[in-house]
Amino acid sequence: GHVFLSTNNGKSWTEINNGLSFPYIRTLAISGTNLFAGGFSLDDVVFLSTNNGTNWSAIGLTQKDVLSFAVSGKNLFVGCDYRFLGGGVFLSTNNGGNWT
C-alpha cells in the first residue's frame, strides 16, 4: 500500500506519497537521513526521500518486484523477486545513483 507517517506513536497517521508514482509500496529502509521505499511496478520501483517522506524521488531500478532492503554503511541492497523480469539482489553504493 501507500506510505504513512505517525508523529504521535501511532495515534494518528498521515499519508506521505508526494512523488511516489505507484501505490504498491512493500518495503521501507532508513539510512541516516535517507528513507527508501520499494515495491512492484513496470516503471520505477525504488524511491528516496531526504525530508522524512514529505517528497519522494525515483532513484532507479525499473520493471522489478522489490521485496526487501538491507543497508550496510553506504551500501543499499535491494532484493527482487526472481519470477518477475530478472530478479535477484541489486547493490547501490551511492543512494541509488547507480545499480549493479
Image (spheres, rainbow, N blue to C red):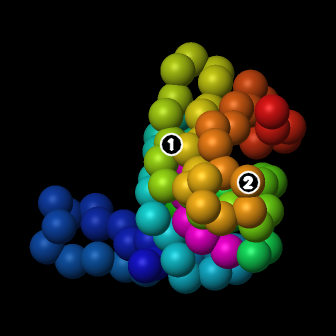
Which residue is painted at 64% across and 24% down in the image? 75
Q: Which residue is mark 2?
A: 86
- Residue 72 placed where, x, y %? 52, 21
Q: Is residue 4 above or below residue 35?
A: below
Mark with earlier residue (1, 2): 1
Residue 93 appearing in the image = yes
- Residue 96 placed where, x, y %? 76, 42
Q: Is residue 80 above or below residue 71?
A: below
Q: Which residue is mark 1?
A: 69
Examine the image and state in which quarter residue 42 appears: bottom right
Which residue is painted at 36% across and 67% down in the image? 5
Q: State whether the magenta stretch is mostly helix, strand or loop.
A: strand
Which residue is painted at 60% across and 61% down in the image? 83
SS at mark 2 in the image: loop
Residue 40, magenta (yes or no): yes
- Residue 59 placed where, x, y %? 78, 53
Question: Which range is magenta?
Answer: 35-41
